[in-house]
Amino acid sequence: MENNNINQRRKPNNKGTKRLFKNPMLEKMTRTHISVPISLLLAYAAGMLIWAIYRTNVPVSNSVALYFLGLFSFTFVEYALHRFVYHMRATTERQRKIQYTMHGVHHEFPKDKDRLALPPVISLSIATALLFLLRLVIGDYTFGFLSGFVTGYSLYLFMHYIMHAYPPPKNFMKKLWVYHSIHHYKDETVYYGVSSPLWDFVFGTVYK
């Protein structure tokens, strides 16, 4: 019987790490300190918001509204990517290898702090690609929207990191730690939202 579930194949190891590539350059690119992508992405987002306000004809109020729309939109994209891409139903060995490289290694070694974010060069490349693509569709409205979207990704990286690196706080935020722990240690088919559990409740992917 084929196993399509990452955690069915490998149990979490909270103290370990694993080499993914024999090539040292490729292996190095899979690791990054969390402060590097967060700092670069927040600077990127700030630059786009400043551009939206001072270098376009879009009203400031509209740019601010688009910023928050982008921030909210990221929570859905985060959920969808985590559920349908990172936890895709791998049916071939190649798909399983891709899945493991993208996300399975994180499930096997959830406390490996250097692998809690995409390498900065990949994150910035994706953000820049989105910038060009969205400009073709919505023009100057892109800057406000994408600024919020990238900020959302930065907040996700921060939340994901502290959930794995620190114990839960003694306040309402504790539930986010609990949900993510359930995803990692009990049932990986629930709680795909990290920065927000909203879409898990909307689509019913909560722990029964």
Image: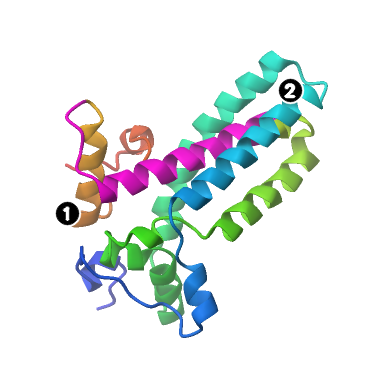
Quadrant in which the N terminus is drawn: bottom left
Q: Main secondary structure of the magenta part?
A: helix
| Residue 76 seen in the current view | no
Circle 1 sits in a helix, a strand or a loop, which is it?
loop
- In the image, 86 versus 126, the foreground residue is 126
> With respect to residue 53, does 93 lie above or below?
below
| In this picture, residue 101 sits left or right of residue 121 | left
At 28% across and 45% down in the image, what residue appears? 163
Residue at point 46%, 49% (across, down): 35
Q: Name the spot of residue 175 as percent of width and height, x first.
A: 22, 34
Residue with the mark numbered 1? 186
Identify residue for label 2.
53
Point 53% across, 44% down: residue: 39
Q: Quadrant of the C terminus?
A: top left
Amino acid beneath label 1: Lys
Q: Which residues are magenta?
A: 144-171
Q: Percent position (x, y) of residue 199?
A: 38, 36
The quadrant holding residue 138 is: top right
Q: Is residue 208 toward the left or the right of residue 73 in the image?
A: left
Check residue 99 for magenta coloring: no
> Where residue 79 sits: x, y (%)?
42, 44
| Mark 1 or 2, closer to the camera | 2
Q: Quick check: is 150 in the magenta stretch? A: yes
Residue kind at label 2, given as amino acid type: Ile
Position of residue 126 relative to residue 102, above or below, is: above
